[in-house]
Amino acid sequence: MSLLNINVPPEKVDNINGYLITRQGKGIYRDNILEKVDPRGRKYFWIDGDEPRWETKDSEDTDFYAIANKYISITPLSLNLTNLDLLKSLRETLKIKF
């Protein structure tokens, strides 16, 4: 199954530069997990960290770049995470047919 992820920059229509067909960009997170204790003495964990950053500088084909530069981003996504090349290779190596 495939779907289109469409992101529109927060701009007035006249300020949008057009649209780009993009790939999914990578977010860069620097999270810290802090162990704390609530008022009842129970432990809990708080995820804390810097504001996320995204690759944009040399990645003109990403959704992050498109939005940062006032373009509508259209990214085709696939919901199947199977590594099809490795699947085929393993079946061939192990002589398994389906």
Image (cartoon, rainbow, N blue to C red):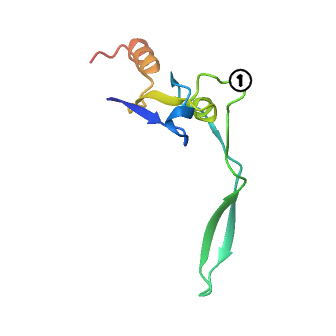
Q: Residue furthest front?
A: 14
Query: Between 97 and 67, which is closer to the camera in this rendering?
Result: 67
Whether 6 is drawn above or below 38: the answer is above
Residue 2: x and y in percent read 35, 28
Whether 68 is drawn above or below 20: the answer is below
Residue 70: x and y in percent read 59, 32
Whether 10 is drawn above or below 17: the answer is below
Residue 75: x and y in percent read 46, 28
Q: Which residue is mark 1?
A: 58
- Label 1 amino acid? Asp
Q: Residue at x 64, y 22 (%)?
A: 60
Query: Between 89 and 74, which is closer to the camera in this rendering?
Result: 74
Query: Between 19 and 90, which is closer to the camera in this rendering?
Result: 19
Q: For mark 1, give the secondary structure.
A: loop
| 90 sits to left or right of 56 | left
Residue 95: x and y in percent read 36, 13
Query: Between 98 and 69, which is closer to the camera in this rendering?
Result: 69
Which quarter shows the C terminus?
top left
Question: Few, some or many C-alpha atoms within 10 Å of disc 1 (few <14, some 14-19, many ≥20)?
Answer: few
Q: Residue furthest left?
A: 98
